[in-house]
């Protein structure tokens, strides 16, 4: 046998259920054919024939020996190679006090070797340690037990520590909130990813007429408001007698607004208009796989620009109703008998003939409204029977190249196609990027001088 464990624990081999019995009180181990008793309880005593057994000491057992553990008496009898134990209970006795020590009969006892005793103790305590490890809980002591009979080892865990008063969190929240509000006004730049552009930091307008109701003067709350969306704030501010923040119907149907093209917080030298022009070429590209309301976009004109007629059919969609409403002279040219192809042709030629100045070496004709020559049919077509469409494709980029804004700053370098001269994003913008190209604008400038 590996060893007989005696104690109050239900897992012991010999269960003695009494408060004066330890959970693992004692053990009996066979060593080289002899049986030895081990006292394993530091707080409760064990006697053999009336004599106290020292803690973790081995005492040899003989036939007729009597072991006392609490109120229990264990009578030992050898039966051949085995050991017979008879357990009796006597109430009212306390071991270690009024003991009547009787001389035990002289029995030859042979003390086992120290290594064998250590092995037997390791067996008992190893089983005991595994039982304790299986019963771990959050309230289980984390320190080893104290020496002696003091068994109070309980210490509070984190869930039993008194929490902080709830008022501490309330006042901390109020203090942090107040400091955040003060910092939002005093150190507004600390909350932005980068400084805003110089156009939105000015306290007065640089251009006249202005395209906004009021200068922003570096205010964050003009755009970032708790009561309205930023798109609404931009549209309500950028509304003046010369400019209204509207977009084309195609972009409106695609869900594209101001913020998709004009993104702020790019630095003081950043100009929102430049980003919008770059957004045109970066979005309208074959490499853009994103769809807008289920529709994709590709590179326009096959990557070039030119006369918008293919196989005799106009690919240009014509002016939107909003744009036509701003150009009543062109709208009046439509006849009830015009086909869609004829109507698009009328719109396209009415926007160019006899009102656009011939520049860049393009041949023009004299006009009474201005001393500069203006475009005519022969400016772009070398023949009309059949109609020449090769020369217009080569002459379009002579006019539609580069871009200079109203402050005479280059937005698109010369030699680079200018998308917005044909594709006007803001139809209600009464200004023109290149006023020197229009005959009536040239006449007005001459009259002002």
Image: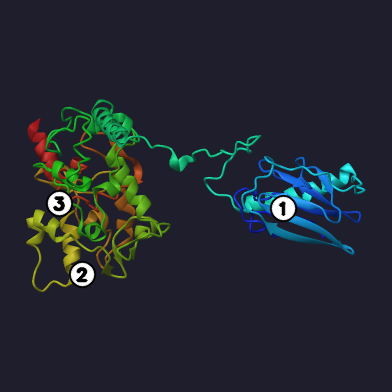
Q: Residue at x 68, y 44 (%)?
A: 95
For label 3, the crowd category at 10 Å Cα-Cα, with few meaning under 14, some 14 to 19 and many 20 or more, is: many
Residue 200 location, quadrant: top left
Question: In which quadrant will I find the C terminus?
Answer: top left
- Rendered residue at 9%/63% (across/down): 333
Image point (9%, 44%), residue name: 369
Eyeballing the image, is 111 above or below 331? Answer: above
Query: Which mark sits nearer the N-terminus, 2 or 3?
Result: 2
Q: Where is mark 3, residue-wise?
A: 354
**Which residue position is annotated with label 2?**
341
Q: In the drawing, what numbered circle is on residue 78?
A: none
Separation of residues labelled 3 and 1 (CA atoms) = 108 Å
Instruction: Give the mark nearer the N terminus: 3 vs 1.
Output: 1
Q: Is residue 344 above or below residue 168?
A: below
* SS for dot 3: loop
Could you give the CA–CA distance between mark 2 and mark 1, rounded to whole angstroms? 98 Å
Q: Position of residue 64 (x, y in %)?
A: 83, 56
């Amino acid at each position: 046998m590996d060893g007989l464990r005696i104690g109050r624990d239900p897992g012991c081999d010999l269960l003695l259920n009494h408060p004066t019995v330890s959970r693992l009180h004692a053990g009996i181990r066979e060593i080289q054919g002899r049986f030895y008793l081990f006292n394993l309880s530091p707080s409760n005593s064990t006697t053999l024939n009336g004599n106290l057994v020292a803690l973790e000491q081995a005492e040899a057992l003989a036939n007729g020996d009597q072991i006392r553990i609490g109120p229990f008496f264990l009578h030992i009898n050898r039966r051949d190679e085995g050991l017979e134990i008879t357990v009796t209970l006597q109430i009212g006795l306390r071991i270690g006090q009024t003991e009547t020590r009787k001389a035990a009969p002289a029995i030859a006892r042979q003390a086992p070797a120290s290594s064998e005793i250590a092995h037997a103790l390791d067996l008992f305590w190893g089983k005991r340690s595994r039982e304790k490890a299986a019963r771990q809980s959050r309230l289980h002591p984390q320190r080893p037990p104290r020496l002696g009979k003091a068994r109070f080892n309980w210490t509070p865990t984190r869930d039993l520590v008194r929490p902080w008063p709830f008022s501490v969190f309330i006042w901390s929240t109020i203090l942090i909130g107040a400091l955040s509000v003060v910092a939002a006004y005093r150190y507004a730049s600390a909350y932005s990813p980068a400084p805003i552009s110089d156009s939105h930091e000015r306290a007065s307008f640089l251009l006249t007429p202005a395209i906004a109701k009021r200068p922003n003067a570096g205010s964050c709350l003009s755009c970032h408001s708790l009561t309205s969306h930023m798109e609404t704030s931009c549209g309500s501010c950028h509304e003046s007698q010369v400019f209204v923040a509207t977009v084309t119907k195609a972009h409106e149907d695609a869900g594209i607004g101001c913020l998709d093209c004009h993104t702020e917080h790019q630095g003081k030298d950043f100009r929102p208009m430049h980003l919008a022009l770059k957004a045109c070429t970066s979005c309208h590209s074959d490499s853009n796989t994103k769809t807008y309301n289920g529709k994709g976009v590709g590179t326009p004109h096959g990557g070039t620009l030119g006369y918008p007629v293919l196989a005799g059919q106009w690919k240009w969609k014509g002016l939107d109703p909003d744009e036509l409403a701003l150009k009543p002279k062109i709208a009046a040219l439509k006849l009830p008998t015009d086909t869609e192809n004829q109507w698009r042709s009328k719109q396209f030629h009415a926007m160019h003939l006899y009102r656009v100045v011939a520049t860049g070496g393009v041949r023009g004709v004299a006009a009474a409204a201005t001393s500069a020559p203006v475009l005519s049919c022969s400016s772009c077509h070398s023949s009309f029977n059949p109609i020449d469409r090769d020369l217009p494709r080569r002459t379009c980029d002579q006019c539609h190249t580069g871009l200079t804004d109203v402050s005479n700053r280059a937005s698109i370098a010369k030699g680079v196609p200018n998308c917005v001269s044909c594709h006007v994003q803001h139809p209600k913008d009464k200004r023109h990027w290149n006023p020197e190209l229009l005959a009536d604008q040239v006449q007005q400038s001459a009259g002002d001088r």
